[in-house]
Image: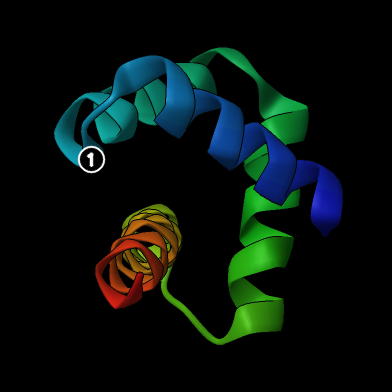
Amino acid sequence: MEDIEDFFISIIKQSHSADLAEAEFKRALIDDEELRRRYKEYCREVGSTERNGFMDFCEEYMDGQDEVWDALSDYDNQE
């Protein structure tokens, strides 16, 4: 499962926005049967739908990145 999440992260980092990342991911799904199979398995394992699985991951990942920056800002403000 980690390898598909790594793939998700690479798309997110390249796209710089959730909408662009989702569009790129959908294009990749169309072109790659193995990716579709792994994605279906991923969605089943995490309890998400195929329609929302990538965006759920994307939002969670981006929220986590925001938390890192917030923590750094909080640290800077304490000095």
Query: Position of 13 compared to 16: left or right?
Result: right
Query: Position of 10 compared to 18: left or right?
Result: right
Q: Residue furthest bottom?
A: 47
Residue toward you, 24 or 38: 24
Say which residue label 1 marks.
18
Q: Residue furthest left?
A: 19
Check the image and report above or below for 33 versus 43. Answer: above
Say whether residue 37 is visible.
no
Tell me where residue 59 sits by quadrant: bottom left
Residue toward you, 59 or 41: 59
Question: Quadrant location of the C terminus?
Answer: bottom left
- Label 1 sits on a secondary structure element that is helix
Q: Amino acid at mark 1?
A: Ala
Give the x, y percent position of residue 3.
83, 43
Tell me which residue sits at (62%, 81%) in the image.
46
Tell me which residue sits at (64%, 51%) in the image.
39
Tell me which residue sits at (33%, 19%) in the image.
15
